[in-house]
Image (cartoon, rainbow, N blue to C red):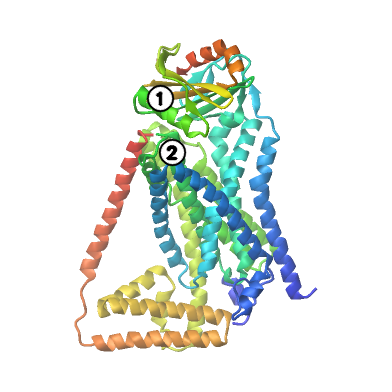
Amino acid sequence: MGPAQAGWVRNAVGSLAVLAVVAAAAFGLPVLDRGMAAGRPVAPGVPYDVGGGVTVIPPAAAWVDVTRTRPGLQRGTALFVVSGVRLAIAAGPYRGSLAEAADRLRAKITSAPGYQMAGQARPFATDQGVAGLLGPFNSSGRLGEYAVVVDHDREAEVTVSGPEEDLRRLQRSLDASLASVAFVGGG
Amino acid sequence: MAAPSQAGAESGKGGGRNGGGWGRGLDGHGGGRWARLAARPSLWMLTLLLVLGGIRMAGIFQHFFSLYPVAASTATILFLGYAVPFVIVVRAIDFLERQPPVLQAAAFGWGALVATSAAIAAGTALSDILAKLASPRFAAQWGPAVAAAGIEEILKMLGIVAIALVGRRHLNGLVDGLVYGALVGLGFQVTEDIVFAMNAVAIGPGTDQVPPVIATFLLRGFLGGLWSHTLFSALAGAGVAYAVVRRDRPGLVRAGVLIGLLLAAWGFHFLWNSPLLSDGFGFGVLGAIVVMLIKGVPALLFGLALVFAAERREADYYAALLAGVGDPRIATRQEIAALVSPRSRVRARQHARLRLGRAGGRAVRRLQRAQARLAVAISRDPGAEVVRRRREVLVCRHRLMALSIAASGAPERRYAFAAASAAVVAEAVVVGLILLGLGYAIAALGGS
């Protein structure tokens, strides 16, 4: 093999090595991630720290999806799954009114393709006594409910969605979870 | 100099015209140049990844622009504008041996398109894996340090390796590695900052509003911009350059320096992203600023020390080549001394501006560039290229002499005081703007 051919081979090997590492990072790691189970059981009836100074009692028999759960100091998110129903909660700092927070959450929901509001929002209060707004939405094959709670400079956004049958069956447990949203050190 | 001499290698300037076996990129002249390039697998690899990364990032940006057109446009304009001072600094570092624009663009593109698109997927996956293996809390706190810093530094470093594969001839000194590394990092930084700004819009108001973009710009640009991807990747770039160029050193040493500098890049990135001292010692905003300086300044000092050392070696090497010409029409001893550092180059131009006006400053700048090109040509090709560059220097010399003759007898312009005053005022304005930005960012983020 002449020097030119050897150079070409080295160049090809180096290029393939770069390509392989990039592919391993971009595709290999996500495949590895998907191969590992994301669900973890949660202790029943115990407040779960969502982050951002907010806790919630997950629905009975729910699992937490650890890939969608990130309890940070300032902000936090958690996703609970029970049967076909998903309860997602996001908490973080907020400056504004409850109505504005509800508008914002509605805009986020309807920005997803196929999602629309299905009725008027109505007021509700958490077990801690913090006022919130709650309303229905739907998409093809799924119904949902959103709730927003604002406490001084913090807020919690909750969305519950799933097949109608599952939602109806778990209604009481889900309502209890919504009402259990609490601001640590607040109320 | 026909080939990388021992002196060249020891001064950190390896390569030369027979630049090595990985493939001599963008080298040669005439019609065969592109044919040779096209036959190089690394060029196809680089093109493929740039196209794939571009498609992926275009999809992400299209999503941003369709949801938040005003915020996305503002973020893009702000962060592209923000890159300009970095490019100016990189060009000042790269003065003596200017890298080909196409390779510089490729390095920026790798950072902006390839490394970012791969890092988005890989970083998310790695953070999820951390959450599964440890806990969501661990992933939230340490994910950016453990997952993001590690994967991003490796992906960015691969960009410099790709440049070395495509344009080996142009990576022949530590400064070249620093320059390509900085450009890869800058591309990454700009794209990542835009993505962060848009995430701030989505998480915050959730509607097309500009304030979260401004807050992100001030926070990531002014407070964290100096010790970010541009700096980290420059360190890794110097490591790659050392491993590629210093063929006179044992393989273990070269690998050790490469790994050491990559670890330094990763370590500084890890420290910056880590939650360590995130409570700001309990002193609120002031404490947070102190922590930011504690985390960022060591990286900046380390990077600056590396840049100065590498520049000095490169400058000494080229200065010796110019001195070897032994022709004061090409370069006087004072001009060679002025050529070796950005500050002395600027001082020489300022001096000429004072004596001969703006045209004089421009003439000295052109002469300096011509002298630098000649030095590079001597290091690579003792033939036609040197003759051409030598002629170029002489033309610049004649222009400067003509200006000097025309200005002889005229009183020396006394702009020194005005120039110094303007510099002080400009610096004060910049510091004021930074402080204003700091205040705005803190206010926008509610004092967090």
Q: How many marks?
A: 2
Indicate left or right for B93 with B176 as reference. left
Give the CA separation, mark 2 to mark 1.
18 Å
The quadrant of the image that shows the C terminus of chain B is: top left
Compared to B42, does B154 lie above or below? above
Which residue corresponds to the image point at 60% horizontal and 47% vertical from the top-left? Answer: B151
Judging depth in this view, the residue of A168 and B294 nearest the camera is A168
Helix, strand, or loop for circle 2? helix
Task: List the single residue furthest toward the left.
Answer: B411
Compared to B136, does A13 lie above or below? below
Compared to B321, does B56 lie above or below? above
The answer to whether residue B340 is visible is yes
Label drawn at residue B329:
none
Judging depth in this view, the residue of B108 and B298 nearest the camera is B108
- Where is residue A76? Give x, y as percent: 50, 28
Label 1, residues with CA under 10 Å away: few <14, some 14-19, many ≥20: many
Indicate left or right for B251 with B111 as reference. right
Label drawn at residue A102:
1
- Judging by the rendered image, the residue that carries numbered circle 2 is B200
The quadrant of the image that shows the N terminus of chain B is: bottom right
- Where is residue A170? Give x, y as percent: 59, 13
Mark 2: which amino acid? Answer: Ala
Mark 1: which amino acid? Answer: Ala
Which residue corresponds to the image point at 52% horizontal and 75% vertical from the top-left? Answer: B317
- Where is residue A178? Give x, y as percent: 50, 16
Compared to B403, does B87 lie above or below? above
Helix, strand, or loop for circle 1? helix
